[in-house]
Amino acid sequence: MVQNIIDVRNLSKSFDISSKEPGLKGTIKHFFRRQTKSLKVIKDISFEIKEGEIVGFLGANGAGKTTILKMLCGLIYPSEGSILVSGYIPFRRKENFLKNITLIMGQKQQLIWDLPPIESFYLNASIYDLDKFEAKKRINKLSEMLEIDEELFIPVRKLSLGQRMKSELLAALIHEPNVLFLDEPTLGLDINAQRNLRKFLQKYNKETNATICLTSHYMKDITSLCKRVICVHEGTISYDGKLDLLLKKLSPFKEILIVCRSEEDAFKLENSGFNVKNKIKNEITIKIENNSITSSLKTILNNFDIEDLFINEPPIDEIIGRVLIKKNHDI
Amino acid sequence: MISNLINRKIFTLLKVQYSNMLEYRVEIALWAISGIIPFFMLNIWTNNNLNESINISDVMLSRYFLCAFFVRQFSVVWVVFSFEEDSLMGKVSPYLIQPLNPFFRYFAQHLAEQITRFPFALMIAFFFFIFNPESIWIPNLVILFLSIVSTFLSFLIQFLIQSIVACLCFWTEKASSIERLLFIPTLFLSGLLAPVVSFPTYVKSWIYLTPFPYLIDFPANLLSGNETNISRGLSMQILWIFLLFPLFKKIWSEGTKKYTAMGS
């Protein structure tokens, strides 16, 4: 039986935020009497993640995804509730816990800017108590997986964003962590670099059975890596489950573009009781429920003279976009 | 455990930071040159014969200010500014989840810079002796060793004070403004502008209860051969380190609970 590696119970987080009215009057008022209010950004959430799972955290900007990741890795202190990651309370930052996890933030870097990445790798290796031989072995293995070689010896400031991100990953994974927290790891990368990074993460997960928690605004990251997603809406979990189930739930129809041999056939099809989305001359688009696709297509092919037929999946960005603005009772 | 930490982590950090510092050698040379306040002060003291009032000869006074320059070069600390910037920009976040306190990185950075600026400081001393040949002296090995120890202790005290102030970033975000408050007493009471012996007796007795005279005055007097109570000076330095270290640990552990990982 696969064990839970992350266990979150009734977790909440509040931040004290100071507010200021606009203009000079507001500035003076703010100087003498600062107004702060407590803002609850995470509200009583609970979930579990099993060892080896890749879970995507989805949510609009400011929904609380990154705050959840920061609490899971022990960077910030929860206001209420409990978290256990690999059996440790993250915020206590015990050495054995820290040796088990890593956090990669797409827009932040830990590599030393003026030195080649290899220097940062050996530094991290010594921080994680790896001897030189082991460090070299791991650097070779990871650089092969990430397909980087010469870049290791070029100062970080001279590397492209994609090369830098690969080096960041290597630096963050040199201690072979069991739990990876990735906050928008593909941010700013071009399509090829994004694809390579996803390939690497899939491979890493397969080879090491590491658990990966990921946030991303690129739906391709989520769909190609995560079977399970947790949707966060205004600090609460609006959905926690399989991605394909969510998609089915939110988009129970498929769109089928049918090209009829004649306009007459198209007219007949339009009036045969199907849910027609639009019709242009002999081309007609109908919406069919996922569970009746086969029978409906059989009927169409048997009764109408069809020249061509295209089944379109609804655009995933559009569906997920709908999730991001929904509360759980709407999903 | 501790020896492993010192041998491997700190040594590697030091090596990496030294390589990093060498990328900025011109800047470090300029920094070294910018620390010549003691020479200006020497000029003011000797031109106005101020040393007569405290019974220090011109030669001993010039040695004192040269030593003050050296001690300052190897004990100057800027951790509050580095930490504040890193904290506000979110750069501290990746370091916080590594099994090594981020302050070790800053510590290694300072040590690496001291090693880098050593040849420049020697060069400045060389020119100083060319213009003041009567000031040349060779301290005996024991005194030299004790001076190096006390300079390092002075660096530790300043590092701890600034680290404590730096941790206030967790509450105020602009901890460097608090550091400015400490800058004034450090400047006047540390012996950088005038040997502490020149203060009135009543004031002196209070000054010696603070950590400031042990930052520059004591190590500089020790190295230059001026009269000083070595055992008292070293004991006070160690005492201040023992007082400041637990305070730093406490403020660090409370502060990290307040950390919001801004900018990341």
Image (tube, rainbow, N blue to C red):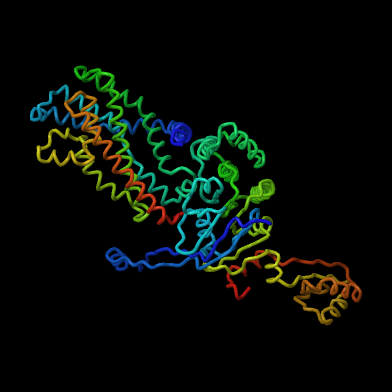
Pinpoint residue A241: horizontal percent, then vertical percent.
65, 65
The residue positioned 40% from the left and 64% from the top of the image is A17
Depth check, front residue: A308 or A249: A249
In the depicted structure, whether residue B10 falls above or below residue A321 = above
Residue A113 visible in the picture = yes
Q: Is residue A329 left or right of residue B235?
A: right
Quadrant location, the C terminus of chain A: bottom right
Q: Is residue B198 left or right of residue A231?
A: left
Residue A5, quarter of the rendered image? bottom right
> Nearest the camera: A46 or B37?
A46
The residue shown at (24%, 25%) is B223
* Figure check: A297 above or below B88: below
Find residue A161 and report its horizontal and vertical position in percent.
57, 45
Q: Position of residue A159 (x, y in %)?
A: 56, 40
Instruction: Choose between B104 and A62: the one closer to the eye.
Output: B104
Quadrant the N terminus of chain A occupies: bottom right
> In the image, is residue B183 above or below residue B35?
below
